Each structure stands twice: as C-alpha cells, then as structure tokens.
Amino acid sequence: MRPSPVFLGILALTVAGGVMAAFGDINTVFVRDRDPLLIAGVVIFVAAGWVASLSLHEFGHAMVAYRGGDYSVAHKGYLTLDVRKYTDPVLSIILPLIFLIIGGIPLPGGAVWINRGALRSRGTSSWVSLAGPLSNLAVGAALALVVALVPMAGGLVIAMSYLALLQIVTFILNILPIPGLDGWGAIEPYLPPQARELGAKVRPWAPIILFAILWFFKPANTALWQGAYSIFGAFGGYVDGAQIGFSVFQFWN
C-alpha cells in the first residue's frame, strides 16, 4: 500500500508549482502583463494538485471497499494511489483537465471497479461511494484552513484557495444523486430493482447531460458555484483569493 512513484511525482510537481507561485509577483494580478512565473506556478499547482486529488478520491473508494470485504482492489493496484490504475489517459485526465482549464468545471475523472457482491452490507456499499467525494471535501477544507491559519506568499494563497474551491465543486458534483455519479451509488443499494435498472440504462448519458446543462444553462452553473462558495466560506475559505486564483489560472481571459 505504498504510494506509487507516479503519485509522488505528481505531488512533487504540485510542490514545484506552489514554489513558483510563491515567488511570482502577486502585484501583477490586476494588470494586463502578469508575471509569467506567477501564472505558471498557479496553473501547475492547480492542475497537478487536481490530478493528485483525483488519485485520493479513487483511493478513498478502494480503501473503504477493501475494508468492507472487496480484497480484489488490492490486486488491481487501486491502493497504490497510482492515477494510471484509475483512469483512461484521454477520458479521465486530458479531457477533464481541458474542461477545467476552459470552463473551470472539474469533471469527475477516475473510476475504480468495485465487486459490490463482495461487500458486507448495503451500508458498506453506500460508504464506498461516499468515500470519494468526502475525500474531496476533506482536501478542500484542509487547504482552506491552511490558507486561513498559515502565513504564506500571496501567489501561493490564491493558488491554494482556488484548488480548495475546486475540491468543493468536485464534492458537490459527485454527491448529486444522478446515475454515474457517487451520489447515485450511495442510494442505489436501497432503491427498488426497477429504479436500479433505469439507472443502469441512463448511467452512460446522465453525467454528460448534467455537464451540458451546467455549460449551457447559466442558472444551473450559478447555483453550483454559489453552493460551492457557501461551503467554502463555511470552512473559512478565502473567497477573494479563490476568485483571483481562478482569474490567473485562466490567464488568457
């Protein structure tokens, strides 16, 4: 169960991005010609940090499943935090990162295949589904608290604040009771067979429809971000810092 070199490498890249952001000129965030070091640091920190959080999300599913009776997750490599074990490179990493960069919406990216029949109870199955989004919530809360309690350079503040906000958004999206998302997985064991069959049929399309709604229907997008900011603020998150971090992350706008 040791972390894989890939995960450690992603963490190292995240740290490198944080160092770059910390040494970037925060005074340039409101001018047209922003400091390239600041921009590169924020982009690297947020993108690499998001991939690391994807690994933690899927590891959360796998660890609860392992403790709940599905020991096959260990043989599949899910307990190594190696993002390659959870993903298809294009559909699970590249495409979500593109959506994150152009739209600021962090698509759920990974997947672990759980043998639900090996789990001890319906409650265990629900907790397996909930473990992933709860890990995002925990990471978001931890980052927000670190920003609030630990003095640090302004560039690192905005990078950590924006990554923390993205974790909250990811939590909200994943917790929705929509087939294909973790919220559905949490309630599915308690649904009647007809509802589970319907969920299985629409599972491939439901998340796509959801993200199309978020992309094209502004009130839905606004509601998502308002909910995220409310939770983020409840954890003591630096809202202005997250908004500035978002602006720097999308440096071309």
Image (spheres, rainbow, N blue to C red):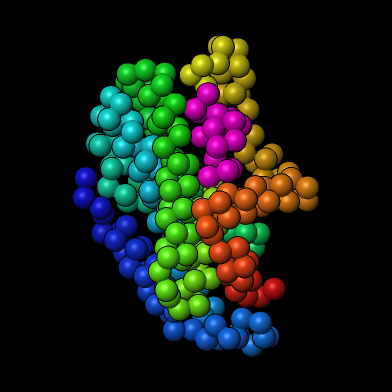
User: Main SS of the magenta segment?
Assistant: helix
Query: Which residue corresponds to the image point at 55% horizontal and 29% vertical from the top-left?
Result: 184
* Residue 3 forms part of the magenta stretch: no
| Residue, far top | 193
Q: Residue at x 30, y 34 (%)?
A: 73
Residue 121 x %, y %: 37, 17
In the image shown, does 184 or 234 lie closer to the viewer?
Answer: 234
Q: Is residue 234 above or below residue 144?
A: above
The outermost residue toward the left is: 2
Q: Residue at x 62, y 20 (%)?
A: 198
What is the x, y in percent for residue 219?
Answer: 78, 47
Which part of the image, by quadrant, shows the N terminus?
A: top left
Taking 166 as reference, is 155 above or below it? below
Q: Is residue 246 visible?
A: no
Examine the image and state in which quarter residue 16 appears: bottom left
The reply to whether the magenta stretch includes residue 186 is yes
List x then y, in percent, for residue 233: 58, 55
Which segment is the magenta one?
Answer: 171-187
- Tell me the quadrant of the picture where the C terminus can be found: bottom right
Left or right side of 64 for 171: right
Q: Residue at x 65, y 47 (%)?
A: 227
Front position in the image: 130 or 95: 130
Res. 45 visible in picture: yes
Q: Nearer the viewer, residue 124 or 236?
A: 236
